[in-house]
């Protein structure tokens, strides 16, 4: 590796490669003494990538030490390395190399998120809760000092998080909105059954109505962003029933043939039926006449 001046930059240890200060070194720790990070937002799945990691560790061992912090109870909390430890347990390792670092709760959250957020295969829900955890931690910490300028810079938390993670501040805000979805809808965003943009719009809606939307999707297949935008506008006018919600979503579904509603007033019908005819009797006569009209080719002949 070379610097801009052409000089070679020599990295001799794993710690240097990880950006860990030289004073920190790794040591072997029993895996049973390490527990998961509280409310860890990233899922550890037994998928193909995990199988590859397991095989790598089986052949080469753990090349990069995990990062933990002491929890004050003679054990450790995992900060970075949940997948490596899971793979190590599958292989049958009882000890893993770990760097032990003292951290506050908020420092640990920020480091945990930053060390995982760049993974390509992250689900929307993982990014959503990770960004939310980091934003809450940063808000508790207060302003962040911009080391390039040497003083506090008044930036919004979501803008700082975005610049740290390769996202725009607007993207970060939209991901965090997903944490307001009921679990069923968030799962639909993860599985791409529900559009990300539609999920963001739904996140502004009351949880009870979100449940109605979830039921609507199960029965009708999906909803689009434009339907939810119109629904939110309707909700500004006051409360609605589940039946009204269904009508609003149906009427604004792209590609759906709008429902036709024909109303015949009692005054109009009274011209053709005796006063003693009931509604059911009038409907029967009308349907018989329409059936005859259709059989005679009325629709095709335009009369």
Image (cartoon, grey):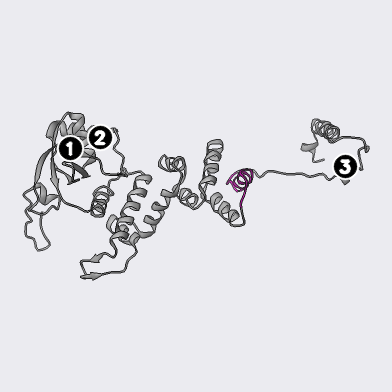
Which of the two discs, 2 and 3, labels the residue nearer the N terminus?
Answer: 2
Segment tinted magenta in the rendering? 239-255
| 127 left or right of 301 in image | left
Residue at disc 1, secondary structure: helix
Which of the two discs, 1 and 2, labels the residue nearer the N terminus?
Answer: 1
Residue at disc 2, secondary structure: helix
Q: Which residue is mark 1?
A: 33
The residue positioned 31% from the left and 54% from the top of the image is: 134
**C-alpha distance separating marks 1 and 2:** 22 Å
**C-alpha distance separating marks 2 and 3:** 72 Å
Say which quadrant the C terminus sits in. top right
Q: Which residue is mark 2?
A: 50
Residue in front for this viewpoint, 249 or 113: 113
Determine the image quadrant of residue 273: top right
* Membership of 218 in magenta stretch: no
Residue 131 coordinates in the image, percent (x, y): 33, 52
């Amino acid at each position: 590796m070379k610097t801009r001046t052409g000089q070679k930059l020599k990295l001799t240890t794993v710690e240097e490669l990880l950006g860990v200060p030289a004073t920190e070194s790794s040591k072997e720790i029993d895996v049973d003494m390490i527990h998961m990070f509280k409310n860890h937002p990233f899922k550890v799945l037994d998928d193909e990538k995990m199988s590859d990691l397991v095989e790598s560790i089986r052949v080469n061992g753990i090349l990069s030490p995990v990062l933990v912090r002491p929890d004050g109870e003679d054990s450790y909390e995992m900060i970075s390395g949940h997948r490596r430890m899971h793979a190590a347990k599958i292989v049958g390792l009882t000890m893993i190399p770990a760097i032990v670092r003292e951290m506050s709760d908020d420092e640990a959250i920020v480091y945990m998120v930053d060390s995982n957020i760049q993974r390509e295969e992250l689900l929307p829900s993982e990014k959503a809760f990770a960004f939310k955890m980091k934003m809450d931690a940063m808000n508790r910490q207060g302003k962040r000092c911009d080391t390039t300028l040497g003083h506090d810079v008044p930036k919004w938390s979501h803008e700082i998080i975005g610049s740290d993670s390769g996202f725009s501040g607007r993207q970060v805000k939209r991901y965090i909105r997903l944490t307001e979805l009921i679990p069923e809808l968030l799962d639909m965003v993860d599985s791409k059954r529900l559009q990300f943009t539609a999920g963001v719009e739904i996140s502004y809606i009351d949880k009870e109505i979100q449940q109605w939307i979830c039921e609507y999707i199960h029965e009708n297949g999906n909803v689009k962003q434009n339907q939810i935008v119109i629904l939110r506008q309707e909700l500004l006018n006051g409360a609605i029933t589940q039946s009204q919600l269904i009508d609003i979503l149906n009427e604004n579904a792209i590609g759906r043939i709008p429902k036709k509603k024909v109303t015949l007033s009692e005054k109009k019908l009274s011209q053709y039926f005796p006063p003693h005819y009931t509604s059911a009797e009038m409907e029967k006569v009308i349907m018989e006449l329409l059936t005859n009209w259709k059989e005679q080719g009325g629709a095709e002949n335009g009369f």
